[in-house]
Image: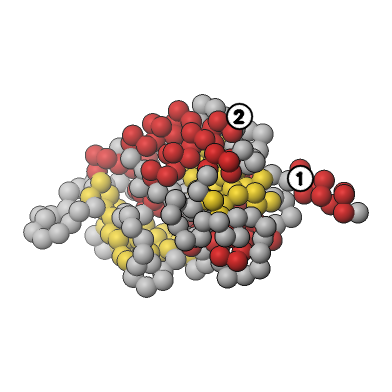
Amino acid sequence: MNDSTDTLADILPGIVVNGASGRMGQMLVQLIAQSESMRLVGVLERSGHDWIGQDIGVAMGGAALGVKVSDDALDAMAKAQAVIDFTTPAATVALAELAAQARAVHVIGTTGLSDGDLVKLQAAARHAVIVRAGNMSLGVNLLVQLTKKVAAALDQDFDIEIIESHHRHKVDAPSGTALMLGEAAAQGRGVKLADVRDSGRDGITGARNRGDIGFSAIRGGDIVGEHDVMFAADGERIILRHLATDRAVFARGALKAALWGQGRKPGEYDMLDVLGL
């Protein structure tokens, strides 16, 4: 019985979590430990972190899980079929090369990536599957599709404003999800977001430019994530809204992406691909 159980466990996809001490990292570790369709084979943290060398379960304040926190990404990736990465642009780009060498699926929820970072990820995607999205939840990805359709249906008499709220610890603004929504609105209108983006209002800015897509960022408390897309014209407003109340929705989406990517051809994908949208 034990032999067959061990054999079954060995054939499940091995997952590495990068940034294991973060909010998303800990949520991912918990869900993988409870999963019957994958196994935790590695957890990574930056060099010098207090958790290095500790069992990840114990470091998180619970029971031992048999996997120690490491700063050796090369060793961790040698055992992995997928790595899930909600960290920083520099850490994500560095890990992408190792994931490509290991032919492991790289699920990226990191935001704030520059154009140069994206070029490097494109190079890595020639050798392995990359699933990258500013938001991994089903609801948000449906909101992206709705935003594109509504923007296409309305003319520039409707100003578009994207309002996003997150916890006080979030370091980037606008959020990756807000930018996804802005891109969807721009695509719906047949324009480039870079040409119509307005996210820096302060002081005497003058009247709003017709056709601009505006961004407003709120930071406070423990807000998980709230996004409104407002289409405002004279006399009426249309508001599309998504509220996330539990960070697990993002973690579950990332795990779904990690499993979906197994056996796929190398390339760049997003959650719309994963969800069949």
> Residue 155 location, x and y as percent?
30, 46
Residue at 48% from the left image edge and 33% from the top image edge: 97
Task: Give the amino acid at mark 1.
Answer: Asp
Q: Is residue 155 left or right of residue 208?
A: right
Q: Could you tell me how far apart the alpha carbons at marks 2 and 1 are, in whole angstroms?
A: 23 Å
Q: Is residue 58 above or below residue 172?
A: below
Q: Is residue 250 above or below residue 132?
A: below
> Residue 48 location, x and y as percent?
43, 54
> Residue 51 location, x and y as percent?
51, 60
Asked whether the viewer can see residue 221, the reply is yes
Instruction: Give the residue number, with chain letter if any, for mark 2.
Output: 265
Q: Quadrant of the N terminus?
A: bottom right
Q: Nearer the viewer, residue 161 or 150?
A: 161
Residue at 40% from the left image edge and 49% from the top image edge: 88
Instruction: Give the residue number, with chain letter if any, for mark 1.
Output: 10
| Colouring of the image | secondary structure
Task: Give the amino acid at mark 2.
Answer: Lys
* Label 2 or label 1, whichever comes before in sequence order: 1
Q: Nearer the viewer, residue 149 or 247?
A: 247
Q: Is residue 189 left or right of residue 272?
A: left
Q: Nearer the viewer, residue 47 or 261?
A: 47
Which mark is in front, 2 or 1?
1
Residue at 18% from the left image edge and 56% from the top image edge: 201
